[in-house]
Image (spheres, grey):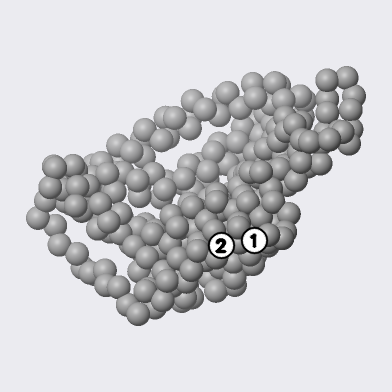
């Protein structure tokens, strides 16, 4: 069901990740993403998996929630594996050769590790940001990090607000889509049988009421903000001011050391290197 998708949702808690400053989590997620894409060694991938499991453990987010967050990208993962499996040309003789299809051992390695990258990327960024950071705190953090751009008159507050509202409304739109599909199923609509083209055509009647509902929600939100005299970031103050604590500096240092370790592992004389 679409209602099972956890993308963009916030889960309140008191874990280490929840208590970190949101700016720390944004910067740490960027460093972690860089580390993911510089890994070229199997040992580095083992360290990556270990770090991802550690993040899941310290976040105290249920593993069931993590799996639900992965479900929407399973098709992307499968497509990534197939693409890398058949398009990678390795050295030596192919393991499988039929017509124009050739599968090399390098293609198998590349398919596995590219999919692993995407998987860890989704899990880590979700844990750093949406799962453990409220939309309000995320807005304040983005605005704070981009505050130097105010000197060149960039509307930082409006930009941060738009990003946060977009993230906040992902679960709402998913819930609305699920309600529309259930309503149409009760009227005889069929979304689960037939080929891919037939299923895609069956979703067309869902799009129109979903668009209408989205515009209606956007209009209601705009009216609500105007009624509360919202005028952007000019002259606004913060009820809770962001402050960096010792735990933030320690966590960021650990993430930087992780990046340094990944780069160092790439130059080890032993261990299987993967060309991804």
Q: Which residue is mark 2?
A: 264
- Image quarter hosting the C terminus: top right
Q: Quadrant of residue 83?
A: top right
Q: Of residues 178 and 46, which is closer to you in this image?
A: 46
Element type where label 1 sits in the image: loop
Kindly tell me whether residue 151 is visible in this rendering: yes
Q: Which residue is mark 1?
A: 268
Q: Of residues 187 and 235, which is closer to you in this image?
A: 235
- Image label count: 2
Q: Of residues 38 and 171, which is closer to you in this image?
A: 38
Residue for point 52% across, 27% down:
207
Q: Residue furthest left?
A: 235
**How busy is the neighbourhood of tag 1: few (under 14 within 10 Å), some, or many (20 plus)?**
few
- On the image, the x and y values in percent for residue 270 come to 72, 60
Q: Is residue 84 above or below residue 31?
A: above
**Left or right of residue 84: residue 102:** right
Element type where label 2 sits in the image: helix
Kindly tell me whether residue 132 is visible in this rendering: no
Residue for point 15% across, 48% down:
150
Q: Is residue 193 above or below residue 262?
A: above
Disc 2/disc 1 C-alpha distance (Å): 7 Å
**Left or right of residue 269: residue 61:** left
**Left or right of residue 83: residue 161:** left
Circles 2 and 1: CB distance less than 8 Å?
A: yes
Residue for point 35% across, 69% down:
21
**Left or right of residue 10: residue 61:** right
- On the image, the x and y values in percent for residue 274 come to 69, 48
- On the image, the x and y values in percent for residue 11 come to 49, 64
Residue for point 47% across, 71% down:
254
- On the image, the x and y values in percent for residue 133 come to 41, 62
Q: Quadrant of residue 74?
A: top right
Q: Of residues 108 and 266, which is closer to you in this image?
A: 266
């Amino acid at each position: 069901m679409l209602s099972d998708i956890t993308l963009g949702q916030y889960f309140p808690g008191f874990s280490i990740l929840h208590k970190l400053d949101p700016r720390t989590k944004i910067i740490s997620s960027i460093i972690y993403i860089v580390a993911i894409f510089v890994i070229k060694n199997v040992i580095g991938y083992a360290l990556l998996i270990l770090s991802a499991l550690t993040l899941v453990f310290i976040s105290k987010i249920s593993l069931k929630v993590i799996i639900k967050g992965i479900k929407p990208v399973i098709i992307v993962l499968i497509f990534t594996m197939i693409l890398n499996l058949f398009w990678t040309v390795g050295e030596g003789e192919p393991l499988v050769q039929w017509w124009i299809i050739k599968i090399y051992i390098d293609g198998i390695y590349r398919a596995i590790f590219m999919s692993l990258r995407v998987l860890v990327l989704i899990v880590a960024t979700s844990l750093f940001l949406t799962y453990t950071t409220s939309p309000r705190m995320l807005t304040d953090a983005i605005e704070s990090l981009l505050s130097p751009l105010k000197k060149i008159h960039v509307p930082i507050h409006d930009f941060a607000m738009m990003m946060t509202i977009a993230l906040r409304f992902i679960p709402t739109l998913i819930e609305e889509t699920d309600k529309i599909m259930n309503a149409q199923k009760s009227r005889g609509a069929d979304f689960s049988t037939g080929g891919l083209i037939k299923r895609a055509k069956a979703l067309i009647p869902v799009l129109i009421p979903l668009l209408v509902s989205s515009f209606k929600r956007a209009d209601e939100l705009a009216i609500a903000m105007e009624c509360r005299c919202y005028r952007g970031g000019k002259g606004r103050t913060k009820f809770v001011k962001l402050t960096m604590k010792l735990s933030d500096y320690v966590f960021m240092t650990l993430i930087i050391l992780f990046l340094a370790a990944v780069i160092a592992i790439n130059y080890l004389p032993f261990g299987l290197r993967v060309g991804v």
